[in-house]
Image (cartoon, rainbow, N blue to C red):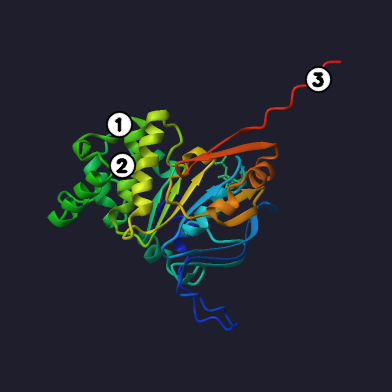
Amino acid sequence: MKPGSRWDKMVSVSEPTEDLPEPNEDLLIEFDDVTVKRNGVTLVGPVSWNVELDERWVVLGPNGAGKTSLMRIAAAEIHPTSGVAHVLGERLGRVDVTELRPRIGLSSAALGHRIPGDEVVRDLVVSAGYAVLGRWREKYDDVDTERAVNMLESVGIEHLSERTYGMLSEGERKRVLIARALMTDPELLLLDEPAAGLDLGGREDLVALLTDLALDADAPATVLITHHVEEIPPGFTHALLLKEGGAVAQGLIDDVITAENLSEAFSQSITLESADGRFFARRTRPKPRHRR
Ligand SMILES: Nc1ncnc2c1ncn2[C@@H]1O[C@H](COP(=O)(O)OP(=O)(O)OP(=O)(O)O)[C@@H](O)[C@H]1O
């Protein structure tokens, strides 16, 4: 989204006259019957969904299920068409989103596409603290530069801090985006398909990184969007399974990620296996016909 777009103008309005539901202070995301509609078509919802402080959620579903649209509400990038959305205790539509967004760490393909290839990695990470994309100052504060390097170190790519973004592999870029998302010490971390485009090794490295993050008690509440159960890092606690904009199931991960629910969400018979806290899914093989 470009600065100055109409969503940027979603600022506080005068005190409402109607009785508003009070936000639950324990919830970072609180969606009540939220919908997203475009041109009369419902893309999402109605969905009600709550994310608590220590939770790590995966949002899973087939292409077009509405995952990114739902996450864009959580990122305060769009408003719901109907329903009530509270993010970090603030009601969308009644809060200055430019103040809310720095409290949310976001990594997405859309953000990645907006990054110029000649952007220096360290500057890209440090500029998140100033809520801008790209080098903004000639010189950043030492404390911010130090934190940026620490963030790069925490995702295992400190050695790339002087490189330009365009020179990085896809896996390295994903790590840079996560470091940038963590730079502002966000209260909520949103990761939209961070494993997309990675090879097997890159995916496994990322799953290991996100596992460490999930198990870190100081890490923010996290929402990870993916199409693939193989990308769910151990340590993730909850799942929301979407199909055609609606929730097929949501709750504790082992209750939601089941063969039955996946078969419903992906509209085909799925066989699910799990090992070492990981999930593996494939289409159920039809039984061989017996010859007479
Ligand atoms: N601005 C828009 N106007 C009209 N339709 C839209 C708009 N944005 C998204 N859509 C449609 O809404 C549906 C949900 O899109 P969304 O990107 O949220 O799904 P998704 O689950 O993230 O998909 P994918 O897994 O393919 O990324 C899709 O059918 C998409 O074409």
Q: Which of 136 and 121 is in front in this view?
A: 121
Residue bearing the label numbered 1: 168
Residue 154 on image: x %, y %: 25, 47
Answer with left or right where residue 136 lies relative to residue 74.
Answer: left
Residue bearing the label numbered 2: 176
Q: What distance separates the C-alpha of mark 3 from that of mark 1? A: 54 Å
Q: Which amino acid does label 3 sit on?
A: His
Q: Does label 3 or label 2 sit earlier along the sequence?
A: 2
Q: Quadrant of residue 262?
A: top right
Q: Which of 161 and 57 is in front in this view?
A: 57
**Mark 1 neighbour density, 10 Å: few (under 14) some (14–19) many (20 or more):** some
**In the picture shown, does residue 203 fall above or below 177?**
above
Q: Which amino acid does label 1 sit on?
A: Leu
Q: Does label 3 or label 1 sit earlier along the sequence?
A: 1
Q: Which amino acid does label 2 sit on?
A: Val
**In the picture shown, does residue 152 fall above or below 24?**
above
Residue 13 on image: x %, y %: 49, 75
Whether residues under marks 1 and 2 lie with C-beta atoms below 8 angstroms apart, the answer is yes
Question: Mark 3 or mark 2: which is in front?
Answer: 3
Q: Which residue lies furthest to the left in this view?
A: 142
Q: Which of 258 and 98 is in front in this view?
A: 258
Q: Quadrant of the C terminus?
A: top right
